């Protein structure tokens, strides 16, 4: 087996609740995912990331865990998960799941025990204080709802610390017992055959007075410890880091190749939208130029959207205001420091822009991750609270409940999108699979092209000068293979003229159209790019 599989894998993020309901109770479940594995194989993805499936009161959709060793009953049982893992593996798919290290639910027995007495051995599992003055340099993440990172607990007679909702008390990593507990949790799921973890909210594990309590050396030391644990016992399994930070602050999470295998590239994401709206490549060149190199065996994870709001934490205040103005004109589209909308509505349901965004997703350095439903251009429901509007049922067919569930519509965990042009009448898997001209087929072809060549995952990345700022042009190179990517970010056509390196062979191939190009000279490539057009041109030197 290839231990470095994640270097060129295509990832797919899915919410078990939202994917497919196999038993008609209105909630998606693990058996439902099993029934849809062939769909994912057909699309061409390599690894599925399951959002949290643990026992939970669901105050934060499962990121509030009440038992790290139990599956939420609506999703099925452990046997269903085992079956899912083996059915996925049988098809060559891998599965990673969320590992929520930073906090538990307040319903977790540890917290229940901790709050009862200062003498409970579980008291030290959490972070307590007599006052709210401690760690005062720490920002609040859920700014719309949380007035403080401290909440008074009547029963405990003390304040407890939480970086997210008050129902999610932070674990205390200064406690050796907590450190051990979480290794045990990892062992449990890895023994079941999980291929790794997307580690949630890792910058916040430790707190230290006088700091902003993020990215602390103690936190990195513990993360290196869990990496050693994986290396020693489970080679080939991966750790994917969720650190919503600037590139220079994410960089240490890769360590010397001894911390995370992968890390989300948060700051590049909003800049894809900025570049598209301005018709200018500068936001992308700027952020990639300030992205430090990472160890050879590590990989970035690039995404356009996920289950959270489109975060605007990694932009300036001015850029944030501008992004809100253009992408979230209505107040209810905003949440915390972000935008709670899906890809297709964000891009005005413009097929050209959606394809172009995917061209960037699949060709920038890193492994891409696709958010379920975005492959068919699903819409969102801004009338649902919190981030629920981007977590609605997957639209399989133009039939009742979008083919997601046989339950009566009022029993569904969330309503199917009911606003045009995003209802299942227009947006569903079955119709797009049947229509070779659909977005789904385009994306599937792009994924297949990507998988046919190592250079997307392994190749170097260099900006090219296309003579105009509206075009994001770059080379990807690996061994004798060279790929020139051209993305026209603007709504006008542009004539592009590019110097070609000497070593290139004479007959470039346009991978997207699968046709030969005949450049007028061997030293320049000149061509016309239509509005929002993208080209992937391969030269074999
Ligand atoms: C990040 C997750 O993506 C988000 O959904 C969750 O609310 C927080 N971490 C807290 O776990
Ligand atoms: Ca169900």
Image (tube, rainbow, N blue to C red):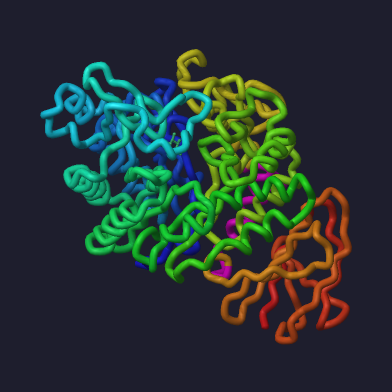
Residue 527 against residue 388 in the figure, above or below: below
Give the residue drawn at x 80%, y 60%: 469
Looking at the rendering, the quadrant in which ligand 2 lies is top left
Front in this rendered view, residue 69 or 463: 463
Give the residue drawn at x 44%, y 21%: 26
Give the residue drawn at x 64%, y 45%: 316
Point out the residue furthest to the bottom here: 503
Looking at the rendered image, the quarter that the N terminus falls into is bottom left
Looking at the rendered image, the quarter that the C terminus falls into is bottom right
- Name the dominant secondary structure of the magenta segment: helix
Left or right: 316, with 415 as reference point: right
Q: Can residue 343 be seen? A: yes
Residue 415 against residue 342 in the figure, above or below: above
Q: Which residues are magenta?
A: 433-455
Numbered-mark total: 0
Within the image, what quadrant is residue 526 found in?
Answer: bottom right
Provide residue 185's location: percent of width, then percent of height: 23, 44
Give the residue drawn at x 52%, y 70%: 458
Decide whether residue 445 is among the magenta residues.
yes
Left or right: 413, with 3 as reference point: right
Decide whether residue 139 is among the magenta residues.
no
Provide residue 460's location: percent of width, then percent of height: 58, 72
Q: Can residue 35 be seen? A: no
Provide residue 229's location: percent of width, then percent of height: 24, 58
Residue 539 against residue 352 in the figure, above or below: below
Left or right: 536, with 236 as reference point: right
Residue 504 against residue 235 in the figure, above or below: below
């Amino acid at each position: 087996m290839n231990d470095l599989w994640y270097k060129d894998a295509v990832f797919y993020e899915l919410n078990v609740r939202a994917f497919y309901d196999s038993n008609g109770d209105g909630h998606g479940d693990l058996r439902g995912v099993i029934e849809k594995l062939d769909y994912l194989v057909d699309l061409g993805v390599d690894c599925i990331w399951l959002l949290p499936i643990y026992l939970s009161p669901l105050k934060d959709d499962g990121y509030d865990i009440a038992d790290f060793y139990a599956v939420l009953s609506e999703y099925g049982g452990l046997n269903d998960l085992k079956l899912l893992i083996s059915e996925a593996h049988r098809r060559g798919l891998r599965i990673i799941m969320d590992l929520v290290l930073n906090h538990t639910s307040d319903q977790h027995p540890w917290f229940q025990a901790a709050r009862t007495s200062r003498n409970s051995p579980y008291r030290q599992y959490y972070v307590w204080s007599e006052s709210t003055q401690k760690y005062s340099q720490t920002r609040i993440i859920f700014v719309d709802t949380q007035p403080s990172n401290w909440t008074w607990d009547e029963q405990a007679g003390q304040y407890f610390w939480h970086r997210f909702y008050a129902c999610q008390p932070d674990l205390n990593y200064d406690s050796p017992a907590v450190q051990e507990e979480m290794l045990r949790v990892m062992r449990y799921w890895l023994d079941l055959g999980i291929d790794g973890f997307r580690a949630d909210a890792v910058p916040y594990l430790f707190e230290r007075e006088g700091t902003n309590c993020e990215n602390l050396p103690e936190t990195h030391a513990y993360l290196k410890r869990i990496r050693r644990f994986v290396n020693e016992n489970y080679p080939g399994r991966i750790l994917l880091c969720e650190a919503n930070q600037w590139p220079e602050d994410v960089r240490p999470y890769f360590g010397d190749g001894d911390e995370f295998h992968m890390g989300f590239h948060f700051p590049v994401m909003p800049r894809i939208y900025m570049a598209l709206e301005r018709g200018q490549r500068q936001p992308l060149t700027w952020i990639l130029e300030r992205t430090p190199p990472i160890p050879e065996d590590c990989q970035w994870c690039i995404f356009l959207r996920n289950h959270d709001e489109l975060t605007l934490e990694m932009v300036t205040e001015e850029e944030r205001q501008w992004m809100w103005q253009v992408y979230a004109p209505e107040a209810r589209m905003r949440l915390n420091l972000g935008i709670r909308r899906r890809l297709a509505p964000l891009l005005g349901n413009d097929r050209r822009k959606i394809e172009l965004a995917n061209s960037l997703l699949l060709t920038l350095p890193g492994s891409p991750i696709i958010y379920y439903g975005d492959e068919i251009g699903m819409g969102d429901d801004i009338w649902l609270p919190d981030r629920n509007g981007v977590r609605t049922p997957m639209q399989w067919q133009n039939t009742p409940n979008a083919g997601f569930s046989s339950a009566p519509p009022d029993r569904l965990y969330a309503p199917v999108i009911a606003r045009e042009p995003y209802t299942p009448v227009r947006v569903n898997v079955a119709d797009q699979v049947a229509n070779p001209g659909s977005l789904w087929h385009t994306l599937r072809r792009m994924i297949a092209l990507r998988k046919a060549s190592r250079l997307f995952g392994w190749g170097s990345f260099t900006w090219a000068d296309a003579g105009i700022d509206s075009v994001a042009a770059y080379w990807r190179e690996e061994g004798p293979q060279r790929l020139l990517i051209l993305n026209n970010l603007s709504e006008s056509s542009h004539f592009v003229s590019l110097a070609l390196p000497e070593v290139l062979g004479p007959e470039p191939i346009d991978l997207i159209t699968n046709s030969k190009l005949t450049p007028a000279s061997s030293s320049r490539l000149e061509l016309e790019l239509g509005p929002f057009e993208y080209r992937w041109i391969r030269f074999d030197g």
